[in-house]
């Protein structure tokens, strides 16, 4: 039983990280029905910025804030120069996303090199025992941050004007525009917010696993994207649910069968959802553009 | 006839002209025979991972190779000919490696391939090189299977994994352990390491209580795997993977092991700075067995270390030493061959050379039978040579 508990805890922690990354995808897709392929590269760059500042001696809070801000800034620039000019085309934004993503990855490679790096973070080696369970304060941090950001997200979308504007744009962009909502500004905000979640996820990932590389954006994308689809692309709480589910499933598979099965099970899960419940856990209705 | 020519469309004329020129070009380029040297240059290709997970290995190997090439060229070259080195990035992966191999064999002036680091990548290259009859003198590809394929063109500087893994498990016996766990990657290298570990464990009466695998280059979350290992209560874990994965796994181990005292026995691939950086505090006390150490007091090695430090500003490791000895063994082979680069593969196998890595010689399969394992421990953020344990290991 305690073994199950340990693996469950591992899964929840991993799941929260996936969820943070997945939220970025869902946010953008929800508004614009577009998969933001550059998302992975943006959160990678933000995470590296934070790592560089930490290793350079900056205080932790500053490194995190600058990392988040950098991610948001890059996302905004990407939106302005790679997406907005081709927004009315269905296919072009996908292509420009991949292109700008490659540019970001290679700039990161030029700055920080191709090697895998550790991410120095407090509490990495600490642990404490609660009865038979061994836990680390870092797990509390990850879970806590995930919950806090989920709560903030929920509050913003339901209780603020900005949140209402976001939902309006998501429901019907042309009408929202006609109603006087500054659609371009809302879109920029959505991209920035997605990037902030992504970079937060990336920092937690780096802190918890102590392993980051300039290819982590692409590598993380596979799991994060699976989580997004399972949760229901376009739904934010779906992204959280999908991330947690994926993390727990992967952890239990490793614990009870073989870690080599993880990818197989992940994709089987994805396929099952696509066949039997394509709208995901959240049951998001597909929007048909006429 | 001229009238018929002018009557054909402009496009047809252009195509015909181009076709004729290409044919002429092909005929002319075919006139230079295969394997011909450009006079007084020995053209050598080096294939190693310069990007990706294995980049630290490949780049360091290349530093060793470049140093040796520079030294040899400055002192007159090989039998009067300068070495021309061309580097290729195989990314430690089979597909790019095969592409690189095809690029290499299409350059007829290349007479040998050196510097190979990753067994999986080189495995994909050997059939291609064999077809072209190009000798391969690999640096640190350690998968034992490479020398069982029957390729006469293949030799390698490093003693293979059977020897290395066996000595790590043997060392567990020296430390008095009877229960170990094995953490290995799911690729060719990892599977081979695990098989050898099983065999060696049997030989030294050690029980493997847990064997966990992961996907190298993809898995970064070792929490669940480590929890499995902790649940089996081993006395030590044999880290049978590459430095990036093993360092990451070790850094995540404290929270999985809790108060349990579980030692780490690493394989030679982990004896580098990157492992130390990634493993952090949790890496203190890790043991490693190796086929090379920079503190080896032999004259050849100390000369190499000094030259390397002068050139690059930091101390060399196994990869650099292998890359360095790689070129010198090639030089010895060409010299033994009377200065010629024909039938180089056979000449390479006949070489006995005292290098930075000790005595290097080759058996009938191209393997280095090995000349003495060394033991080190991670203390205070550094790998420290342990003379007592080294002697104990070689005396067992």
Image (cartoon, rainbow, N blue to C red):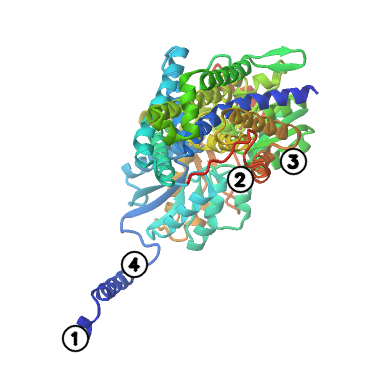
Label located before the other in sequence (2 or 1): 1
| Side (left or right) of B192 relative to A211 | right
The residue under label 4 is: B32
Seen at 66% across and 19% down, the residue is: B255
Protein chain holding label 4: B
Secondary element type, mark 2: loop
From what the image shows, is residue A173 above or below residue B117? above
Is label 4 on the same chain as label 2?
A: yes
Q: Position of residue A125 (x, y in %)?
A: 60, 16
The residue under label 3 is: B199
Secondary element type, mark 3: helix
Question: Does the image show residue A255?
Answer: yes
For label 1, count other residues whose C-alpha is less than 10 Å away and answer few (under 14), some (14-19) or many (20+): few
**Between B285 and A216, the one nearer to me in the picture:** A216
Q: Quadrant of residue B18?
A: bottom left
Label located before the other in sequence (4 or 1): 1
User: Quadrant where the C terminus of chain B lies?
Assistant: top right
**Between A252 and A128, the one nearer to me in the picture:** A252
């Amino acid at each position: 039983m305690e073994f199950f508990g340990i693996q469950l805890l591992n899964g929840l922690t991993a799941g929260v990280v996936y969820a943070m990354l997945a939220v970025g995808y869902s946010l953008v897709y929800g508004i614009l029905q577009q998969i933001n392929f550059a998302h992975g590269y943006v959160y990678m760059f933000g995470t590296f910025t934070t790592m560089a500042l930490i290793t350079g001696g900056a205080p932790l809070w500053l490194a995190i804030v600058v990392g988040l801000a950098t991610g948001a800034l890059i996302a905004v620039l990407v939106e302005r120069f790679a997406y907005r000019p081709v927004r009315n085309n269905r296919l072009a934004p996908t292509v420009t996303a991949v292109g700008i993503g490659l540019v970001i990855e290679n700039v990161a490679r030029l700055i920080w090199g191709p090697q895998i790096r550790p991410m120095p973070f407090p509490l990495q080696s600490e642990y404490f025992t609660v009865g038979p369970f061994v836990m680390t304060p870092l797990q509390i941090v990850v879970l806590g941050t995930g919950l806090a950001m989920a709560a903030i997200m929920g509050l913003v979308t339901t209780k603020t004007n900005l949140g209402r504007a976001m939902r309006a744009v998501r429901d019907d962009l042309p009408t929202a525009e006609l109603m006087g909502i500054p659609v371009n500004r809302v879109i920029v905000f959505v991209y920035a917010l997605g990037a902030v979640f992504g970079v937060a996820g990336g920092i937690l990932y780096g802190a918890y696993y102590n392993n980051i590389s300039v290819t982590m954006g692409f590598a993380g994308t596979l799991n994060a994207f699976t989580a997004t689809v399972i949760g229901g692309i376009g739904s934010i709480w779906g992204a959280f649910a999908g991330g947690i589910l994926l993390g727990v499933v992967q952890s239990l598979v490793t614990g009870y069968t073989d870690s080599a099965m993880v990818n197989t099970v992940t994709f089987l899960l994805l396929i099952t959802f696509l066949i039997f419940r394509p709208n995901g856990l959240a049951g998001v209705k597909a929007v048909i553009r006429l | 006839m001229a009238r018929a020519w002018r009557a054909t469309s402009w496009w047809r004329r252009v195509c015909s002209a181009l076709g004729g020129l290409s044919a002429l070009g092909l005929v002319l380029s075919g006139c230079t025979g295969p394997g011909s040297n450009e006079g007084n240059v020995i053209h050598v290709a080096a294939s190693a991972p310069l990007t990706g997970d294995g980049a630290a290995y490949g780049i360091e190997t290349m530093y060793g190779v470049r140093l040796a090439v520079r030294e040899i060229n400055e002192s007159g070259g090989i039998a009067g000919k300068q070495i021309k080195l061309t580097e290729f990035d195989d990314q430690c992966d089979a597909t790019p490696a095969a592409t690189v191999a095809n690029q290499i064999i299409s350059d007829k002036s290349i007479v040998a391939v050196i510097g190979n680091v990753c067994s999986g990548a080189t495995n994909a290259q050997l059939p291609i090189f064999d077809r072209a009859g190009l000798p391969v003198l690999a640096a640190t590809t350690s998968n034992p299977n490479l020398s069982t394929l029957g390729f006469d063109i293949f030799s390698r500087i490093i003693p293979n994994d059977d020897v290395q893994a066996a000595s790590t498990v043997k060392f567990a016996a020296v430390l008095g352990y009877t229960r170990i766990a094995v953490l290995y990657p799911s690729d060719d290298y990892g599977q081979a390491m695990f098989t050898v570990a099983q065999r060696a464990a049997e030989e030294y009466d050690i029980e493997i209580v847990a064997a966990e695998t992961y996907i190298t280059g993809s898995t970064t979350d070792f929490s669940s795997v480590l929890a499995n290992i902790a649940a089996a209560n081993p006395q030590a874990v044999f880290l049978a993977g590459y430095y990036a994965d093993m360092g990451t796994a070790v850094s995540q181990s404290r929270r999985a092991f809790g108060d349990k005292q579980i030692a780490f026995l690493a394989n030679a691939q982990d004896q580098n700075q990157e492992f130390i950086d990634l493993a952090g505090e949790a890496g203190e006390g890790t043991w490693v067995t190796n086929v090379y150490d920079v503190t080896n007091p032999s004259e050849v090695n100390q000369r190499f270390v000094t030259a390397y430090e002068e050139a690059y500003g930091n101390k060399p490791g196994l990869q650099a030493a292998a890359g360095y000895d790689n070129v010198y063994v090639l030089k010895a082979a060409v010299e033994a061959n009377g200065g010629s680069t024909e039938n180089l593969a056979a000449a390479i196998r006949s070489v006995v050379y005292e290098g930075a890595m000790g005595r290097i010689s080759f058996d009938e399969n191209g393997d280095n039978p090995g000349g003495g394992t060394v033991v080190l421990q991670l203390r205070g953020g550094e790998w420290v040579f342990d003379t007592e344990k080294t002697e104990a290991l070689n005396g067992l």
